Amino acid sequence: MFKKIVFKNGLRLITVPGKNAQSVTILVLVKTGSKYEKKEINGISHFLEHLYFKGTKKRPTPISVAETLDRVGGIFNAFTGEDYTGYWAKVASSNFDLALDWVSDIFFNSLLPKEEIEKERGVILEEINTYLDIPALHIQDLWTELLYGNQPAGWPITGRKENILKMSRQELINYRERQYVAENTLISVAGNISLEQALKGIKKYFQKIKIKKPFGKEKVIENQTKPSMLLKFKKTDQTHLCLGVRGYNSFHPKKYIQELLASILGGMMSSRLFVEIRGKLGLAYSISTSTEDDPDTGYLVTRAGVDNKRADIAISAILKEYKNISQKKVSKEELKKAKDHYKGTTALYLEQSESKASFFARQELLENKILTPEEVFNKIDKITAEDILAVAKDVFKPEKLNLAIIGPFKDKEKFKRLLKF
């Protein structure tokens, strides 16, 4: 289904064929993100990503960068996470060479013009302000800050304002020179393109990638021994919260069990928490439970926006469902529904060439191995009700419990007393 090629310089290529597709996606992933940063340059990965659309020697202005693919109806973007930074373009397969030329051009030849750096400081500061002004978004940063504190895993991907204001062009160049190298880079090509075409194109456009040893990231420290919470006072119309537990990372053999556990709790409109919190109690418009499994961190969390006057009731109701699922096995029907939901949503997700490119690339970059969808589904099918119960008992313990809140409250103890099973 896919092919993996490792070049002599360490650069990796993954191709995922899709003969029935009309499109092709080129995704370049670099193994660097906010977890790889020092405190004084927190936000540099994200800042650099923004600047890659500001001009190259061949395409000297932001408009000329954008127009290249706009003229052929292409879609393009970039993103920064904790563990990687990505640049991608999706075009009709007949425009594959153009898209590859474009991606490689911004990857190798972005000029980082001083005047654009100064403009982009303002853009990023406004992006940070956007997150701060929208509690439903800001609560996620508070959640990771609560879990990991003053270490890279707990810092915002966008960085702190004071860093953005003082970050120099030379710091950006130094970071790029060290991290955007062959060993750290993976290219994923998915869609209606042959292996031969992809291989020829990558050799043509990416052969000049630098060979250098990149720097790694700090080991994440987790030493929680009791329930913990973080309260952010803000005059809001509703209380926004993240309530969950530390869980398994991407290398843990039980990560798929954790995923089904989250689905049963709050991953569907017929899940337990959706039915209870929204359907029966009418406490929230939005509520969901999900997991995050990265190479060195993992958690299960329920996010909700609830009535300010009934926030304590919502928290207690969520904890009640956590407790229930850790004391009694789920039914065969509920487990089957969660499995079918997982497989169905994954199948729908993978219909898009950009999703296929990401699905295979992320595994290879972060875990150095790739499971096909069929192999993942096989693991899902083997999960039993006993497995769900065992994982629930393991993660739903008081010493793993965390609550982050944004709302019009100043009494932290009022909520902290609720954190028990």
Image: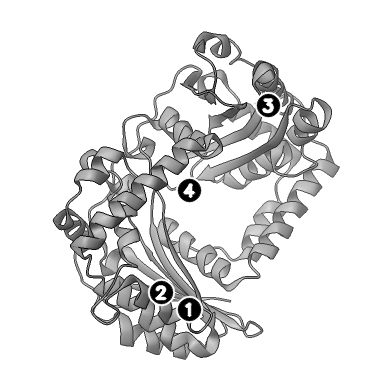
| Mark 1 and mark 4: Cα distance apart in space | 40 Å
- In the picture provided, is 288 more to the left or to the right than 336? left
- Mark before the other along the chain sequence, 1 or 4: 1
Q: Position of residue 396 (x, y in %)?
A: 61, 26
Q: Residue at x 62, y 34 (%)?
A: 302
Looking at marks 3 and 2 on the same chain, the residue that comes earlier in the sequence is marked by 2
Question: Considering only vertical position in the picture, is 27 above or below 390?
Answer: below
66 left or right of 150? Answer: right
User: 70 above or below 394?
Assistant: below
- Please state which of residues 72 and 27 is positioned toward the viewer in this rendering: 72
Of discs 3 and 1, which sits in the foreground? 1
Q: Position of residue 196 (x, y in %)?
A: 46, 90
The numbered mark, 2 or 4, whose residue comes first in the sequence reads 2
> How far apart, in angstroms, are the residues tagged by discs 3 and 1?
48 Å
On the question of residue 221 being in view, the answer is yes
Q: Which of the marked residues, 4 or 3, is nearer the chain's N terminus?
A: 4
Label 2 element class: helix
Query: Tag on residue 251?
Result: 4
Residue occupying image coordinates x 70% and y 32%: 389
Specify the amino acid type for callout 4: Phe
- Kindly report the distance in space between the C-alpha atoms of the residues bearing marks 1 and 2: 6 Å
The secondary structure type at the circle numbered 1 is: helix
On the image, numbered disc 1 is attached to which residue?
70
Check residue 322 in the rendering and tell me which mark sits there, or answer none: 3
Label 1, residues with CA under 10 Å away: few <14, some 14-19, many ≥20: some
At label 3, the amino acid type is: Tyr
**Few, some or many C-alpha atoms within 10 Å of disc 3 (few <14, some 14-19, many ≥20)?**
many
Tag 1 near tag 2, CB within 8 Å: yes
